Image (spheres, grey):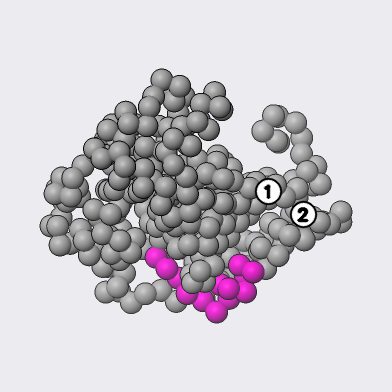
Amino acid sequence: MSANGHPMTDSTALRVQAFNTADVAEQIRATPGWVQHYQQMSPGHFAGQIRYLDLQGVQIYEECMNTRVEQNFSAPSGALAFCFDRSDNALYVLNGESRNIWITPENYQEVAVVFGPEFVQHHGLDVARLEGLFMAPLNSQQNGLFSRWLSGTLTRLAQTFDPPSRESLTQQLLDDCLYILDNAVCLDPGSLQRRAEERSIMKRIGEWAADSPDETLNLLELSGFAGVSLRQLQHTFKAYTGMTPSHWLRLRRLNSARHELLGRNALDKTVAEVAMNWSFWHLGRFSNSYRALFGELPSETLKRGQRLR
């Protein structure tokens, strides 16, 4: 059944949808079903794209973004997702409990196959048996080949009037994903343990960031919230994001300011008020930092937000 309750034919089920986006908030809205919070983390005008194919219980997603983006996300509840990072051809397996935070490289591309909860139950996929593999980078010679095939399949299906049957494509996706998982090479146990500890720290930070978007912390408060020493916090951030925690906190405040400038109450705001709301006390420095990150002055963002109301 489709979202509006009408029966779906194979032709509609194999219709590839594509969305070009100009803001991280648009990128989130173009990916239904996922719990996500995005923030821009490198300079420039954001440009992204989402392509996805709904196979009634199984979806193929492809995501592209030109700037670095912090992704705080969870897969749909009850689902099993195979995510192929095309920057390093690593496979990441996620379930609905795999809440994670990380920062993408620039010009990031990812393609994913998501088996929905009903499909997982119907095919007897015992997700519990994958414990220890969730969010661990898995390497296989087939990763790059399969991710290119997935991307090419989306392109071909967007152009063809004679698609394969939904059933045959769904079965092929399941067989191929399980084959790749069976042949994937995981990190050594010691590396897995360290990564699990780092992931646990970043999960606590990610949960705070997603659940308290209007709250700001200083560096020592963030370290205390994560329950680790400042040195361990710095090491974990370097491993996961490639930046210091203080830089991350500053970028977070800039993203929050942008969200407020584009918000529903933008008509009643000034740039100075928004800057001070996010602890930017020098308006000139705030404007320069904001323009360096987003490619426009905060006053330009505010005017655009006001025009959208």
**Is residue 119 left or right of 258 when viewed as pictured?**
right
Q: Identify the residue shown where x is 45% and y is 29%.
A: 263
| Residue extending furthest toward the front | 284
Residue of label 1: 18
Q: CA distance from mark 2 to mark 1?
A: 9 Å
Residue 87, position as x, y percentages in the image: 51, 69
**Is residue 118 left or right of 135 when viewed as pictured?**
right
Residue of label 2: 158
Residue 171, position as x, y percentages in the image: 68, 60
Residue range of the region highlighted in magenta in the rendering: 136-148
Whether residue 35 appears in this view of the structure is yes
Residue 233, position as x, y percentages in the image: 20, 58
Image quarter hosting the C terminus = top right
Q: Identify the residue shown where x is 52% and y is 61%.
A: 108
Front residue of this view, candidates 2 and 36: 36
Image quarter hosting the N terminus = top right
Q: Could you say whether the residue bearing mark 2 is in a helix, strand or loop?
A: helix
Q: Could you say whether the residue bearing mark 1 is in a helix, strand or loop?
A: strand
Circles 2 and 1: CB atoms closer than 8 Å? yes
Amino acid carrying label 2: it is Ala
The crowd level at tag 2 (other Cα within 10 Å; few <14, some 14-19, many 20+) is some
Q: Identify the residue shown where x is 38% and y is 27%.
A: 270
Whether residue 197 appears in this view of the structure is no
**Is residue 190 left or right of 305 when viewed as pictured?**
left
Amino acid carrying label 1: it is Ala
